[in-house]
Amino acid sequence: MSSLAPISQHTIGPFFPQTFFTEGDNDLTRLHAGAQPTARGEAILIRGRVTKEGGFPCINMILEAWQADAEGRFNHPADPEQHLADPDFLGWGRAWTDAEGHYEFRTLMPGGFDDPAGRRAPHVNLTVMGAGLMRRVLATLFFPDFAEANAADPLLSLVPEARRGKIVAVPEGEEGGVRVFRFDIHLRGGVEEETPFFED
């Protein structure tokens, strides 16, 4: 018996149940939901919306974030300064989009660091995966606070100047004394609309 060929109406997975997530998964400032948040650095909120062509929300998408601590260090063996990294900062988190495509992370303003490619500006790496994507996509979020460092960042310099604003977060005031940044992700659309993505 031959298998049926997929038709255009079939949606590509994966599909993630809500039980895939636990409380505090989107909080990078603590090692687990019951832990105290790190006392180092500036806590911030990153919020945004994931959409596809036409501005339609991407529902139940997974976003994973990882970044350096407030001093630009990673608690990872590949970092020669791992012994100096913030022991109370997880540096990794997972969020998902709601029915309107919204997501949120609580984290720290990251520090910059030296990389074989050159000095990296403070940034947060984001992976997006979910229904409709053949493979995960990678975005990098930069901050407007560091214009000089952004201009010298070797990865950001690969993005055409006219599109660099698409990967710089937008300040949106404060909430409870914590600065809020907006970073929308457009998965599909014209060159003017789509978020620049990077290869693994």
Image (cartoon, grey):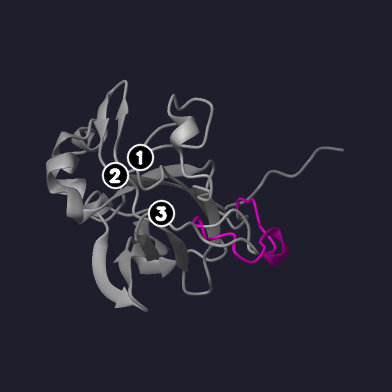
* Residue 28 screen position, x and y as percent: 50, 55
Instruction: Name the N-terminal-most of marks 1 and 3.
Output: 3
Q: Which residues are magenta?
A: 12-29
Q: Considering the image in quadrants, where does the C terminus appear?
A: top left
Q: Is residue 73 above or below residue 175?
A: above
Q: Main secondary structure of the magenta part?
A: loop
> Does the CB distance between marks 1 and 2 fall below 8 Å?
yes
Image coords of residue 8 (percent x, y): 57, 53
Residue 17 in the magenta stretch? The answer is yes
Q: Look at the image and say whether residue 113 sits in the magenta stretch.
A: no
Q: Is residue 45 left or right of residue 58?
A: left
Residue type indicated by callout 2: Pro
Above or below 41: residue 84: above
Q: Position of residue 115 (x, y in %)?
A: 32, 26
Which residue is depicted at the point 28% across and 23% down?
A: 117
Circle 3 SS class: loop
Q: Nearer the viewer, mark 3 or mark 2?
A: 3
Q: Residue at x 36, y 48 (%)?
A: 70
Q: Position of residue 182 (x, y in %)?
A: 31, 65
- Residue drawn 36% across and 37% down? 198
- The residue most toward the bottom is 176
To which residue does mark 1 refer?
72
The label number, if any, that marks residue 122 in the structure image: 2
